[in-house]
Image (cartoon, rainbow, N blue to C red):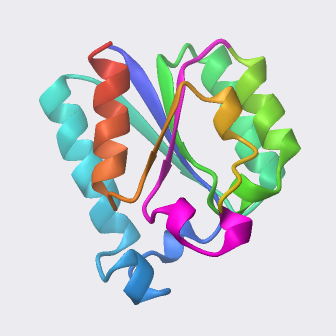
Amino acid sequence: MKEYLILNGPNINMTGLREKGVYGTKTYQDMLDMIQAEADRLGVKVRFVQSNHEGALIDAIQQAYFDGCAGIVFNPGGYTHTSVALHDAVASVPIPTVEVHMSNIHAREAYRHTSMTASAAAGQIVGFGFKGYIMGLRALAEE
């Protein structure tokens, strides 16, 4: 059975508590439950990793390769706009990665319009809330 890494960066674990006008009131656990239910429907396994630390995210990307993961759905959070290291980590492994963002980063503050990681990803999904993760997982699993 194929396995996919669902990787979340800084502050994503605070979803439902932070900036409710941007991210809504559903919790991080609600999101994980929704993704797990979709994985079950698709007949695939998912592994969830969330970290507020850049190095831990890089370690998770590299470990996904060594563990034979079929793909990564990745929300780098605030590191999206600043981390060349995460770009390089995604580029360094031959695993398709879909970058997701719950909000439309292109409709927010100007500094959020640039993604350092998107050019290393197979695609980017923005602005669909939790559904973006489902769209990313489907894109990878139905490939």
Residue 102 included in the magenta stretch of the image: yes
Q: Residue 102: which quarter of the image?
A: bottom left
Q: Is residue 37 above or below residue 51?
A: above
Q: Position of residue 131 (x, y in %)?
A: 27, 52
Count of labels shown?
0
Q: Position of residue 70 (x, y in %)?
A: 47, 16
Q: Is residue 71 left or right of residue 139?
A: right
Q: Residue at 36%, 15% (x, y): give it.
A: 2
Quadrant housing the N terminus: top left
Outermost residue, left side: 41
Q: Position of residue 65 (x, y in %)?
A: 65, 18
Q: Is residue 43 left or right of residue 1?
A: left
Q: Where does the magenta region start and end?
A: 94-112
Residue 111 included in the magenta stretch of the image: yes
Q: Residue at 67%, 65% (x, y): give it.
A: 112
Along the line of sight, the residue nearer the viewer: 11 or 21: 21
Q: Is residue 119 above or below residue 68?
A: below
Q: Position of residue 58 (x, y in %)?
A: 77, 39
Q: Residue at 33%, 12% (x, y): give it.
A: 143
Along the line of sight, the residue nearer the viewer: 68 or 111: 111
Q: Is residue 101 above or below residue 42?
A: below
Q: Is residue 64 left or right of residue 128?
A: right
Outermost residue, right side: 85
Q: Is residue 46 above or below residue 105?
A: above
Q: Residue at 45%, 38% (x, y): give it.
A: 47
Along the line of sight, the residue nearer the viewer: 124 or 47: 124
